[in-house]
Image (cartoon, helix red, strand yellow):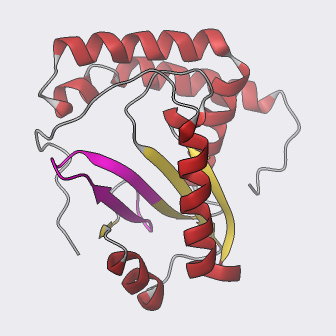
Amino acid sequence: MKELDKNIKRKYSFSEYDPNWKAQFSSIENFLTNIFGNKATKIEHVGSTSIEGMKAKPLIDVLVAVEKVEAFDKEKQAIVEAGYEWGENYIAPNTLLFFKLGPDGEKLENIHVCEIESAKARQFIIMRDYLRTHPEKARDYSDLKQRNVELYPNDYPAYREAKTAFLNQLELEAYEWFKTIRLDIRI
């Protein structure tokens, strides 16, 4: 397990939407389906690369929803052997994060293992679906991220901090929107 530091000044980039992100997700999904089998209730493409047309860091975020986060020793070993590093409770309690870095240290993939009924799993899905159905909000978020990349090209913590207030407001709007629709929240 690698100790993860959210404040590390790591390299990152930002790009136009790339339709290949869907294929990258499909490849990761197949890989994870083979590893988790029926322990994974759902495997979902989340994050900005899952929003068609949205500019984003070219980082594929994947949610693996499980009934209960457990040791997953066999699964961890298989994922690590495929070139990922991992940490526990990085994004929220009772979660696992696997990540793959490129040769220059830039994150390429995040695999978030969360309990299906957890607040974090709900947040991933609600935010994704809200941005997919509200293209003007996705555009506003994309524009903010573009400005932050220009302001903080080598300072990821500053980039992330500069979008916090906007994201908090966006999340409130997304949850209000979610209350108005009928969905099975059990992803």
Residue 119 can be seen in this image: no
Nearer the observer, 15 or 171? 15
Task: Give residue 36's position: percent from left, percent from top.
Answer: 59, 79
32 in relation to 107, above or below: below
Q: Quadrant of the rendered structure where residue 28 is? A: bottom right
The residue lying toward the viewer, choosing from 105 and 179, is 105
Residue at x 22% of width, y 12% of height? 150
The quarter of the displayed image where residue 106 is located: top left
Q: Is residue 137 above or below residue 29?
A: above
Image point (47%, 59%), residue name: 112
Residue at point 62%, 21% (across, down): 173
Q: Nearer the viewer, residue 102 or 136?
A: 102
Question: Residue 96 colored magenta?
Answer: yes
Q: Within the magenta stretch, is there residue 87? A: no
Image coords of residue 8 (percent x, y): 12, 44
Q: Please determine whether, in this image, residue 57 is positioned above or below residue 59.
A: above
The magenta region covers 92-111
